[in-house]
């Protein structure tokens, strides 16, 4: 299988456009997206940024001021606390700016490898491969890798896929995973890359 060819097909067929690339917005939105559906994350982010415009304003907020705003994204108490902590750290240590360094991003509370990689690519244009549950699941299902967790998948894919595809692949894999290659009952019948898929259950999943 030509993995680069299939990756390009997924990016072409399932493009994802990021309308707001402002670093703080992307960072906070990605924190909000943890264990949340995209549509709920969008509502929560919109609510939050209509009231609090930047790190300086959020650094002075109280967690309970955020609760109702971000409630649609779930885990709102934990996320409110983290977002305010992040804003305070940015104000105190980074002059209110989101760092464009992977290691510095990982120092922020609630920021893991996936979130850091999304911020680096979307906001700063730095080649970064964010691996979430969609990317991990689909990469294994297609037969690209045989890995047990997203971090292992990330390092394997970085060796298999050209650097220029790292950034776009995450968003496209998410769209592909929501529309076609679903966790349960994937729509193999309408899958544009079915012939390149090595998943043993694909013929039984046509719906």
Image (cartoon, rainbow, N blue to C red):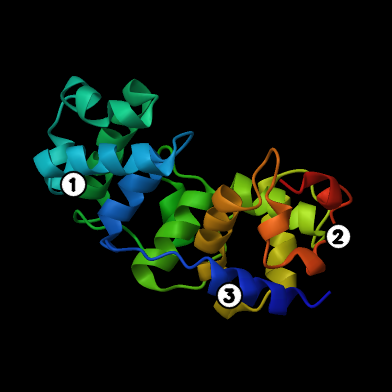
Alpha carbons under labels 2 and 3: distance apart: 21 Å
- Residue hosting label 3: 165
Answer few, some or many: residues within 10 Å of disc 2's Cα (few below 14, many 20 plus, some between 14 and 19). some
Identify the residue at image location x=78%, y=53%: 140
Quarter of image, res 73: top left
- Image quarter in which the N terminus is found: bottom right
Q: Is residue 42 left or right of residue 75?
A: left
Which residue in the rendered view is the most extreme toward the right?
Answer: 200
Residue bearing the label numbered 2: 198
Expressed as whole percent of the image width and height from the top left, the position of residue 200 reads: 89, 51
**In which quadrant is the C terminus drawn?**
top right
Q: Quadrant of residue 62?
A: top left
Q: Residue at x 78, y 45 (%)?
A: 205
Helix, strand or loop status at disc 3 = helix
Residue 139 coordinates in the image, percent (x, y)? 73, 57
Which comes before the other along the chain, label 2 or label 1? 1
Task: Classify 64 as above or below 127.
Answer: above
Residue sitting at x 83%, y 59%: 143
Nearest-to-viewer mark from 3 and 1: 3
Q: On residue 6, which mark appears?
A: none
Marks 2 & 3, CB-CB < 8 Å contact: no
* Residue position marked by numbered label 1 in the rendering: 55
Question: In this orientation, does residue 151 appear?
Answer: no
User: From the viewer's perspective, is 53 left or right of 67?
Assistant: left
Query: How far is mark 2 from mark 1, CA to CA?
Result: 46 Å
Q: Residue at x 58, y 59 (%)?
A: 173
Classify 10 Å Cα crowding around label 1: few (below 14), some (14-19), many (20 and above): many
Q: Earlier in the sequence, mark 2 or mark 3?
A: 3
């Amino acid at each position: 299988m030509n993995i680069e060819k299939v990756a390009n097909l997924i990016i072409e067929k399932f493009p994802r456009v990021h309308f707001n690339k402002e670093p703080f917005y992307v960072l906070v939105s990605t924190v909000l997206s943890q264990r949340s559906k995209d549509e709920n994350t969008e509502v929560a982010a919109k609510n939050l940024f209509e009231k609090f415009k930047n790190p300086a304003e959020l650094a002075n907020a109280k967690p309970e001021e955020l609760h109702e705003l971000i409630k649609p994204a779930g885990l709102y108490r934990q996320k409110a606390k983290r977002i305010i902590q992040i804003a305070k750290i940015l104000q105190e240590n980074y002059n209110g700016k989101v760092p464009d360094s992977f290691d510095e991003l990982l120092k922020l509370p609630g920021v893991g490898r996936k979130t850091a990689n999304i911020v680096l690519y979307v906001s700063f244009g730095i080649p970064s491969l964010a691996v979430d549950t969609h990317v991990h699941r689909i990469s294994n299902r297609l037969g690209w890798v045989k890995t047990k967790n997203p971090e292992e998948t990330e390092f394997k894919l970085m060796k298999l896929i050209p650097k220029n595809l790292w950034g776009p692949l995450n968003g496209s894999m998410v769209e592909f995973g929501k529309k076609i290659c679903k966790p349960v009952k994937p729509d193999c019948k309408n899958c544009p890359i079915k012939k390149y898929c090595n998943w043993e259950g694909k013929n039984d999943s046509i719906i």
